[in-house]
Image (cartoon, grey):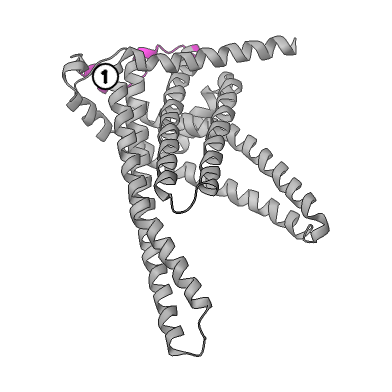
Amino acid sequence: MGQFSFWNLLKEFASMLNESRKLFLKNKKLMFSVLVFYLLLNGLLYSFNVLTITPEITNMTQDLNVLSTMDPSSPEYMAQLMKVFADFRLFVVSSDIFNVVSFIINVLSVIVIVHASALTYKHENVKFKDFVVLVLKSWKGPLVTSFYISLFGLGYCLFFLIILFPIILSSLSIASLFSLVAKIFVLLVLFTLFGSYLAIVWYLSMVISIVEETYGIQALGEAAKIVKGMKPKLFLFNIFYVLLISGLAQIVTVVSLVVDRSQSFAVTLAIGLVLVVSAFMGVFLLMTYTVAYFQCKSPHGQDAESLRDVEYTTLPTTSLIGALP
């Protein structure tokens, strides 16, 4: 009986993935434009990181290495120390700018992808300018919801550290190093699994805050209420996503270690390709949760075509093919 239920779960999971895949085929122009938009924004963000933050880290590391070889009593030591402080301040400013821009790009990308997925799922075509207006009108809900999700995520990470700290203290001896690594690994796996379970509500609440006029705690509560029957396959999807992203991260690590430092372009290219695949997976994840949202709503007696507010129904149905650049 358990094997039969698991087989049904796998079939439902595959069906959900196939439904998400079909969104690209239903409106190729819109979905391809959204994918290019997402890749372009993340490419610019990656370029900023490579051209600005990475050189600053390199300069700071080099200055620290020089500082370690100098006599602390010499006047040159103090000058070098001030240079390290200046490098650190510059790094902090650049990192703050990067984090703010990254957050804005992330929220904007989520809004664009979810709106495009929802319109495609409901077979609605809109003009490009109307789509832009729709996106710009939807910024408040996702922004508030993402703030609450960030707080919950931060609290979850702190909870992980609170549990991890006593384990480290109790295994400080070299003899128990293997035991410490094993305990940390097991704890990390458990927290990743539970985090993937919590992320079901977090991701779905972001979709709700865009498709509906509900956001913040209300969106999280609504997501928890409607997702009950979908949790097993969405949890399976989250695990699949985490494993894939972890595998891509391992590829970057291996390339960085194997490739000679003089061939930095090869490393940058490999990282760029991995980021492109990761970006595509991010788009697919949001498409899948948009599909899951409509599937969650259907059993609750609501027609998928009437779930959006009046803005969806009043938009013109002009074909997007001639409207998008």
Q: Residue at x 54, y 28 (%)?
A: 224
Viewer-proximal residue, 158 or 93? 93
Amino acid type indicated by mark 1: Lys
Give coordinates of residue 7: x percent, y percent: 66, 11
Residue furthest out toward the right: 175
Q: Please identify the quadrant where the C terminus is shown.
A: top left
Give whichever of 109, 124 is nearer the camera: 109
**Residue 209 lies in the magenta-colored region:** no
Residue depicted at x 51% and y 42%: 252
Tally of numbered discs: 1
Quarter location, residue 118: top left
Magenta residues (range): 299-315
Crowding near the residue tagged with mark 1, few <14, some 14–19, many ≥20 C-alpha atoms within 10 Å: some
114 over 80 or under it: above or below:
above
Q: Residue at x 71, y 48 (%)?
A: 184
Q: Looking at the rendering, in which quadrant would you find the N terminus?
A: top right
Answer whether residue 306 is magenta in the image. yes
The image shows residue 170 at horizontal and vertical percentages of 79, 58
Label 1, secondary structure: give it.
Answer: helix
Counting from the top left corner in percent of width and height, residue 83 is at 39, 76
- Residue at screen point 21% across, 17% down: 320
Residue 122 is at least partly visible in this image:
no
Seen in the picture, residue 312 relative to 123 is either above or below; the reply is below
Between 303 and 9, the residue placed more toward the observer is 9
49 in relation to 137, above or below? below
Residue 233 place in picture, x, y as percent: 58, 20
Residue 210 is at least partly visible in this image? yes
Instruction: Name the residue beneath numbered marker 1.
Output: 29
